[in-house]
Amino acid sequence: MYVSRIRISNGKISLAFDSMTGELLELISEKTGENFIKNSCFSRPQGFLIEAEGKGGEKYQLTVPFTKDAIADPSLRCSFEKREENGDILLEIRYKKLYRDRKDYVDFPVSYALRLKRGEAAAEWKITLKNHAENMTVEKLNFPYINGIVLGDRDEKDKLYVPIAGGMCFEKPCEFLTKPVKSIQWRWQEYRYNYVVDGYPAAEKDGYYQVSTRYPGDLAMSYIDYCDESNGFYLGIHDRQAKIISMNIGTYGAKCLGMNFDVEKELSLSYGEEYVSPPVVTALHGGDWREGADIYRAFRQPLIPAQKPMPEWQKENAGLVAHYDFIYQNGGIVHTYDDIPALAEKCKALGLSHMLIAGWHEGGFDRGFPSYRAERSLGGEEKLREGVEAAKKKGVYITPYINSRLVNVKLMTKDIEDACIVNKQGEKEIEQYGNKDISFYTMCPMSGAWQKKFVGFGKELCEKYGFAGLYMDVFATSPHYCYNKSHEHAPDEWREGYQKILSDLNADYKAREKEEMCLIYEWAADVYAGLSCGQLVQTFGRYHTGAFPEMYRYTFPEHIIVDMLYPEKNMAMRPVHIGKISEKLMQQAYTLGFYFWIYDLEEDNTFDRDKEKLSLLKRTIAARNAWLKNYGAGTYLDDYGIKSCTEGVNVKVYDTPRGKLMAYFNDREGDFSVETARDVEIRQVFCADKAANVVCAEYFTDGRAVTVKNAKIGFILFDEK
């Protein structure tokens, strides 16, 4: 008897495949009966897509057989094998031939397997790909391709959570990703910036809009969650090795409703070579994005290093003050080493004990890499040592900027010239920042020479000048496949190199019986976070396009997030629309328990020229310091137990050793109320007054609602009954 669809189910989730082509046709929640695939999306590949290159440079795409051909020719039909294993349901789908460029068929056996886990509404996908073609090299694999996901009847209430730089949330993503992008351009010194103020810069081709991001790096975590009020779809790359891989998200928008997802791997498989993909898990849940976060945390948490201890001086400190104004890229000097003690006093007056300096070394910022030595024109080595020591005596610890992967092509030295990343074409990777006349080679973290050199920089700087740690720029962002044969690593190995660098830096401090090293780096990546004291996410640049750092904060609440705060007025470094969200950024950073990054760049970016926001900043710092000193950072619980609160009030909950803490930030000066889902006992309410003193606030409560009188920033201590 002819069977049009092959079905598998474990009682929680069921999937159906075309019996001829193996294309996925149904993805059903057995609990609700809802089929998440509501658009077959004929123009997109189903199951997988293989890209190959012929010996003459011809490009090919290999896909599953076409239906009419599989009906006419039985040899083109895929075969299915279904079995049980330890209570799981397994399905293997095998192909003998693949459709090449929708023109002809080639002998190219492929098989992939699905596992439905017992008792879970989840399916695990895994493919084994061996190159059986002597005249082709496999260049890329997209697997699995899951197309046409629509929640409910339309996407009016849909939200797509993507962990780009810590998290983004695209509301009504089919519409949002296809809307015209609005942007503004901004000039600051040698730098030319383009800021998106509406929409998202998805790549468009033939009416299809796609966002493609790599992990680990551009993606802070390797999962997405797509949900509405009652349905949730999770897709996670569960690679225990955390090798470089991409996640693609695409849509045609309202004209062909639905979201399409696939996982992309760059390969270079010659004849006879084999690739086995990491498991990709798709799961259905009830519609709360945190359910997806819980799935991912359960997988990834045991595989990443535990959170390293912070230095004692950092534990009760709300953030840092950043000075990029020693030597700018254009050669301009604002500060010398003699200014460090006064800058430290200014930092201390804000209530902070951490200062970061950039452009402090030979050649200056975005030019002198990697000449990480004291600059004579700024005062020389002795003056730098004296300045750092004087700051420390005032209770201010200094960390210097160094770049984790850039080397000025004019400063390349023989001991690291072979550490460069080499692309598939055999060319060294080059990056440019600011002045386009300045180019940098990109170093590979898997290169032993670069590991040794970079760790050596860190050790020497701390020993010679007394720095308390390092800030490492372009660290977790933009991972590169590296084909430099002298490195003796696979092209997709990246994570191991940076973990080794962090581990070696931490081990050096322990060996010398020093206080813990303060290591902070740019961007966010779960696989490195535990070895650092902070990850800089820079929410400001994505605030208008859907920034949602709560995604990372909730998934890994023990990891430390650093974010930038800005004044509203008289700021030259960033455009006006960034200044307009000054208070929103401050509110977010405070309630989410971030480590504040505050620039102090004289005429370019300083709160000194915005007295109103300076006052608000001091209150925010005071409240955060009091919270840290008396209750510790706590474990972030998002809005756990909060039923409602006054409009304009941001509230987040933490579990601390001394009970529950509710951090609040009111967008106005006045009374507000918070209602909890269950009865609680309010122990105390604190607020930062206009003089930046943390004092007891007046409040009243009826067991499930608390009203705080005339308060803007502070925290509430409570116990659940």
Image (tube, rainbow, N blue to C red):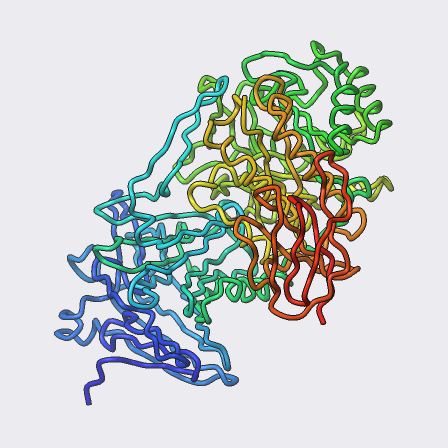
Of 514 and 677, which appears nearest the observer?
677
In the foreground, 517 or 395:
395
Residue 540: give x, y in percent of width and height. Answer: 51, 37
Identified at 72% across, 72% down, the residue is 721
Toward which corner of the image does residue 258 lie, by quadrant?
bottom left
Q: Position of residue 218 (x, y in %)?
A: 49, 45
Q: How many marks?
A: 0
Residue 279 location (% of width, % of height): 47, 65
Q: Is residue 624 left or right of residue 512?
A: left
Residue in front for this viewpoint, 294 or 245: 294
Judged left or right of residue 625, residue 325 is left
Above or below residue 488? Residue 471 is above
Check the image and name the residue furthest to the top.
377
Residue at 58%, 29% (x, y): give it. 567
Q: Is residue 55 left or right of residue 486?
A: left
Front one among 146 and 414: 146
Work out whether 47 lies above or below 32.
Answer: above
Q: Is residue 329 above or below residue 116?
A: above
696 w.r.t. 601: above or below = below
Percent x, y of residue 414: 60, 25
Tell me if I can see residue 632 in this picture. yes
Name the residue rendered at 35%, 55% in the picture: 172
The part of the image, by quadrant, that contains residue 345 is top right
Q: Residue at x 24, y 55 (%)?
A: 254
The quarter of the picture where the N terminus appears is bottom left
